[in-house]
Image: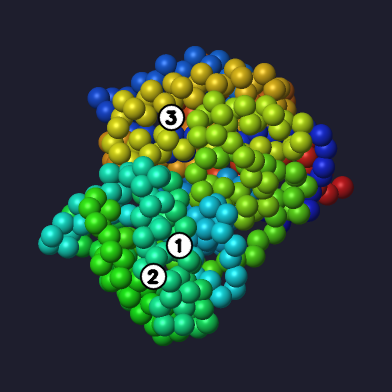
Amino acid sequence: MELIDKLALKNGRKLLLFVIDGLGGAPRDGKTELENANTPNLNALAKKSILGLTDPVSTGITPGSGPAHLSLFGYDPIKYEIGRGVLEALGVGMELTERDIAVRGNFATMDEKGIIVDRRAGRIPSEKNKKICDILREHIEKIEDVDIIIHPGKEHRFVVLFRGDGLYPNVLETDPQEEGNPPIECKAITEDSEKTARIVREFIKRAKEVLSLPANMVLLRGFAKYPCLSTMGERFKLSPACIATYPMYKGLAKLVGMEVLKTGDTIYDEAETLKRNWNNFDFFYFHVKKTDSLGEDGNFDGKVKLIEKVDGIIPEVLSLSPDVMVVTGDHSTPAVLKAHSWHPNPFLLFSEFVIPDGIESFTERDCAGGGLGRFPSLDVIPLMLAYGLKLKKYGA
């Protein structure tokens, strides 16, 4: 990637990275969600494209959304391990200081035995979330000498900043990741994080005292301080923009120097935002979230239907005539697993300079036979720059 940074050049060609979150799946009765979906527009695009499969981190590794996206944006996810709390905080517009520990929270449902029975509290409405955050703010403003700053996110998600001196993020996350387990006690992993762990335990104790069903517990993960990254503009000579509806993905985009464009909540709103801003940037990251959510909920048929809706906006996107368009996922979220997985992502790259594979549909199995083969997601940006004629020749 350091070589790519040196070779990158500016021109007027437009690049579009279209990310269908959690797109890849696993079979139910022999077919994945993508194989079950009716996708005539993606199939037509596949015929004119080169296909492949990508691994976000490494073969067999199940990635979180943060590392999966960083890889797509051209940042080594092993070198740059970014805590989810920072991404969520940036995504909801919070200003971070060097004294902050940022944490991503879930409102959850806990039974009388202390067992988590729903990690997302039924995906409570965002309006309900705001009211709960107001209650927490009213009752928990400060713990010892640490300020507690709380901000609502979408549905069951919220962000909390612990702002004070002597705070370090090396503590255990409290989210057990699976229902049927009690929350994990926040403990320090390193000696310098003892204060952080103590403050977090007190925060959870006070939160439990004022919360009620269905959101009667908080689960915390992604403890992190703000990192410093070179921007995509500095590295790749791009003027990048982000079109996304969920805070974390906006936070990821901000972290790498994208301008986050204001948009509505639907994919149709996002498409309109893309058209409205097409002349102002040369790189667009277009993110579709709900495919991932439906996969995590185990809603196989719902994910199929949403893929079909996404397919419906492809002609509208193509009408803008992008010079390079990639369609892929950040990671796979098979509904049969109800979770992120290690399965590689289906990948499609369209440009006037590709030699098409001649494959007639866009599915995991078809992508496995594509000309790009199976490769790391970290190579996506170099490929897009190359097909956009945005890389100088290397050497004499």
Q: How is the image coloured?
A: rainbow
Name the residue tied to disc 2.
140
Residue 394 can be seen, yes or no:
yes
Given residues 283 and 269, the one toward you in this image is 269
- Mark 1 vs mark 2, CA separation in Å: 9 Å
What is the residue that sits farthest to the right in this orientation? 396
CA neighbours of label 2 inside 10 A, class few (<14), some (14 to 19), many (20+): some
CA neighbours of label 3 inside 10 A, class few (<14), some (14 to 19), many (20+): many
Query: To which quarter of the image does residue 273 belong?
Result: top right
Report whether 72 appears left or right of 123. right
Q: Image point 39% across, 70% down: which residue?
A: 140
Which disc is residue 364 wearing? 3
Q: Mark 1: which secondary structure? A: strand
- In this picture, is 133 found above or below 265? below
Q: Image point 28% across, 64% down: which residue?
A: 210
- Mark 3 vs mark 2, CA separation in Å: 48 Å
Q: At label 2, which amino acid type do we have?
A: Ile
Given residues 226 and 51, the one toward you in this image is 226
Q: Position of residue 146 (x, y in %)?
A: 46, 78
- Mark 3 vs mark 1, CA separation in Å: 41 Å
Name the residue tied to disc 1.
150
Contact between labelled residues 2 and 1, with CB atoms less than 8 Å apart: yes
Q: At label 1, which amino acid type do we have?
A: Ile
Q: Position of residue 231 (x, y in %)?
A: 70, 55
N-term mark: 1 or 2: 2
N-term mark: 3 or 1: 1
Q: Image point 38% across, 23% down: which residue?
A: 305
Residue 58 can be seen, yes or no:
no
Between marks 3 and 1 in the image, the one whose residue lies nearer the viewer = 1
Between marks 3 and 2 in the image, the one whose residue lies nearer the viewer = 2
Query: To which quarter of the image does residue 48 belong?
Result: top right
Q: At label 3, which amino acid type do we have?
A: Glu
